[in-house]
Image: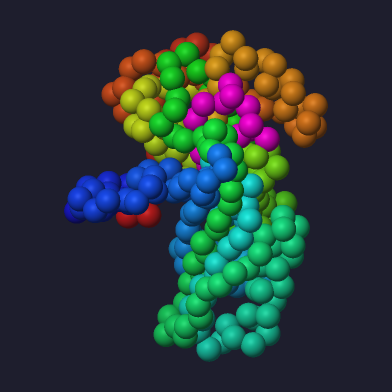
């Protein structure tokens, strides 16, 4: 099996290809989906946060970690164009993270659950001889016709992103430098999810492919390219960021949405999005027909060749 995260996932998908999926989508999107009748589908995602990989315990409060643990999973649901409905939570805790620490974690998890009306319907707890591990299963639902998959981008589409990129990565950099109280550091510790925006974009037919930005667009855009069999051009001067461009495209954990949009309808979508959310939908490039797996980076029309990669676990 491959020693890269996504190579490993691909090998697992091939290994299990001989088992009927019973109506569930194959591995490859932010969530798997299955029809539940009445023109609706259930979307299901799972994600794990591990101490010293996804968070540093002495740099995050248990309340913040409880919030972030659910938010990053709600982001996956939003990326499918769905609205979250419920979650399951599993915790592996060392002895020094039980009691007051666990209670504060659950308070954060509860507050995010209540904000979005997400019921906690099950899970598991176990002791840990090492660090903290958190696993969340998020469930949502939406009209089947609203589902946005990574495989639906077509040449000519505009590539858009919500929000501004790079703040979370800059926050991690601040935390590692001992500056845990900056605005960027707070952004990294708390996470976010474009819950309302994802459900609204799901209802727009001009939106084709969509996913959330967890590893940086330098990696995440390649997933859309691979699943859709297309290429992409990105204009670096159009990247919405308050930090340097490399951090913005490689840093990850922004949990903004990236989507491809019918170019002829893009201006109207952006206008409607701004009217609905008071925020800008940024055009950063376009989908092209070439499918060699490489993003074409342009700086004010001039082709550049930076060695930009998003976050990789392996």
Write down the quadrant of residue 114 in the picture: bottom right
Q: Is residue 22 left or right of residue 251?
A: left
Magenta span: 200-213
Horizontal and vertical percent for residue 230?
36, 22
The residue sitting at 68% across, 35% down in the picture is 200
Is residue 226 depicted above or below 255 in this figure?
above
Q: Give the mark count.
A: 0
Task: State yes or no: residue 145 in magenta.
Answer: no
The residue sitting at 37% across, 54% down in the picture is 313
Write down the quadrant of residue 29 in the picture: top left
Q: Is residue 303 left or right of residue 93?
A: left
Quadrant of the drawing holding the C terminus: bottom left
Q: Is residue 163 visible?
A: no
Horizontal and vertical percent for residue 102?
63, 80
Horizontal and vertical percent for residue 98?
59, 86
Is residue 42 depicted above or below 298 in this figure?
below
The residue sitting at 36% across, 15% down in the picture is 289
Task: State yes or no: residue 207 in magenta.
Answer: yes
């Amino acid at each position: 099996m491959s020693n890269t995260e996504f190579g490993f996932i691909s090998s697992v998908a091939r290994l299990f290809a001989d088992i009927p999926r019973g109506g569930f989508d194959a591995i490859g999107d932010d969530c798997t989906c299955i029809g539940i009748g009445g023109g609706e589908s259930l979307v299901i995602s799972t994600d794990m946060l591990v101490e010293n990989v996804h968070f540093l315990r002495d740099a995050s409060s248990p309340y913040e970690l409880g919030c972030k643990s659910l938010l990053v999973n709600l982001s996956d649901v939003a990326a499918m164009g769905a609205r979250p409905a419920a979650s399951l939570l599993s915790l592996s805790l060392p002895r020094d993270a039980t009691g007051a620490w666990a209670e504060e974690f659950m308070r954060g998890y509860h507050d995010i659950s209540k904000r979005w009306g997400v019921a906690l319907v099950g899970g598991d707890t176990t002791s840990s001889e090492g660090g903290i591990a958190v696993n969340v299963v998020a469930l949502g639902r939406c009209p089947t016709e609203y589902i946005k998959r990574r495989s639906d981008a077509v040449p000519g589409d505009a590539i858009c992103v919500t929000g501004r990129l790079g703040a979370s990565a800059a926050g991690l950099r601040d935390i590692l430098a001992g500056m845990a109280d900056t605005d960027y550091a707070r952004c990294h510790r708390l996470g976010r999810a474009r819950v309302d925006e994802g459900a609204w974009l799901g209802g727009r037919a001009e939106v084709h492919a969509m996913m959330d930005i967890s590893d940086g667009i330098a990696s995440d855009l390649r997933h859309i390219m691979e699943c859709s069999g297309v290429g992409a051009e990105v204009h670096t001067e159009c990247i919405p960021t308050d930090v340097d461009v490399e951090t913005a495209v490689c840093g990850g954990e922004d949990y903004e949405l990236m989507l491809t949009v019918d170019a002829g309808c893009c201006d109207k979508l952006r206008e409607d999005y701004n009217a609905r959310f008071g925020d800008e939908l940024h055009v950063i490039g376009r989908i092209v027909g070439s499918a060699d797996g490489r993003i074409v980076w342009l700086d004010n029309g001039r082709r550049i060749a930076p060695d930009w990669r998003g976050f990789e676990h392996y």
